[in-house]
Image (cartoon, grey):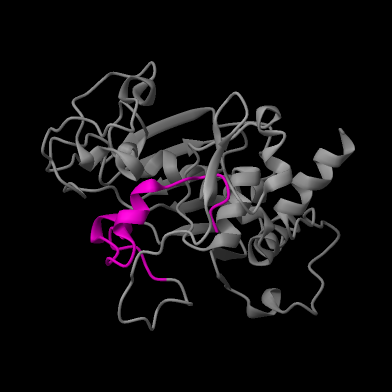
Amino acid sequence: MDLFDYKPKMEALHGEQLPDSVRNGQRLTGMTANQSSFPLANSFFKFNQHGKSGAWISELMPHTAKIADELCFIKSMHTEAINHDPAITFFQTGSQQRSYANFRRGVEIVRNGLIGKVTRVEVGLPAGHEDSLDSEDVTTPPANLNYDAWCGPSEKLPFIHARHHRNWRWHLAYGGGQLMDWIGHHNDIAHWGLGLDKTGPVEVESIGWTKPKTPIYNAPVDFAVHSRYAGGVSIEISTKHTKGTKWIGTDGWVYVNRGTIEASNNDWLRAENSLGKYRAYASDDHTRNFLELSLIHI
């Protein structure tokens, strides 16, 4: 439900089918997977501007509207998550995976030494895009878009829908491609399992990078980054690895991804089995953590 994001164009588009360019092939949610059509739906409630700032606020929030000038509305956030809960988690914390029990279990298996001495970690990330995901035509920016402000200090390239909205990430003037999109997820988990949150590699090598076919993007399609750390362990980030994080040790391995955990020894995966003294910090709800921290500082 939109409360602070007035969308006047939705009034004109109400009832029309969701354009393919919005989803870009992204999976459907469980709630909509069986739908035969996907009509756009405008808000049933009216919006009005409030305060000196002219903030648009739904009529559902009459008391909040009275303090409009005391609020900060951030409308530049983006997340890959298609469902509400992980999207909120990402908004509140910047990362959603450390709250998942399977990632925590994998970290505890590694940190308790069950796989022996870790020799290397495979981090699989999705590949970039060879072809453009929207129109490549150079057009005038929409009237409701301040394109100068949108570009900010970055290079001001001609406005093209194929690299605007969620697709800004595929051009290095604005983003870092899939590598920078996902490294903060699966490589973060790799660091957590190795106990390297407060350090970094001593040597980094990039190999096997390929370029897109379209000139609209210039972030790599396929890539590999090999990082070596003090002590000899290496992390291999690559589009060729299975997506997720896999620690490989002298006595076994464990692999984690969203919704998945596998190991060379299935006994490690049974919740009733103790893994050892080390316990990864429990964070089952990052949204609650954020709110609790906010209350401490009020």
- Total number of numbered discs in the rendering: 0
Q: Is residue 6 magenta?
A: yes
Q: Quadrant of the C terminus?
A: top right
Q: Position of residue 138 (x, y in %)?
A: 12, 33
Q: Is residue 115 visible?
A: no
Q: Main secondary structure of the magenta part?
A: loop
Q: Position of residue 38 (x, y in %)?
A: 33, 71
Q: Nearer the viewer, residue 51 or 259?
A: 51
Residue drawn at x 47%, y 45% as measured from the top left: 6
Look at the image and give the residue range highlighted in magenta: 1-28
Please identify the quarter of the rendering in which residue 29 is found. bottom left
- Left or right of 176, for residue 265: right
Q: Position of residue 60 (x, y in %)?
A: 64, 54
Residue drawn at x 34%, y 25% as measured from the top left: 146
Q: Quadrant of the N terminus?
A: bottom right
- Left or right of 17, for residue 56: right
Q: Position of residue 77 (x, y in %)?
A: 50, 40
- Left or right of 211, for residue 151: right
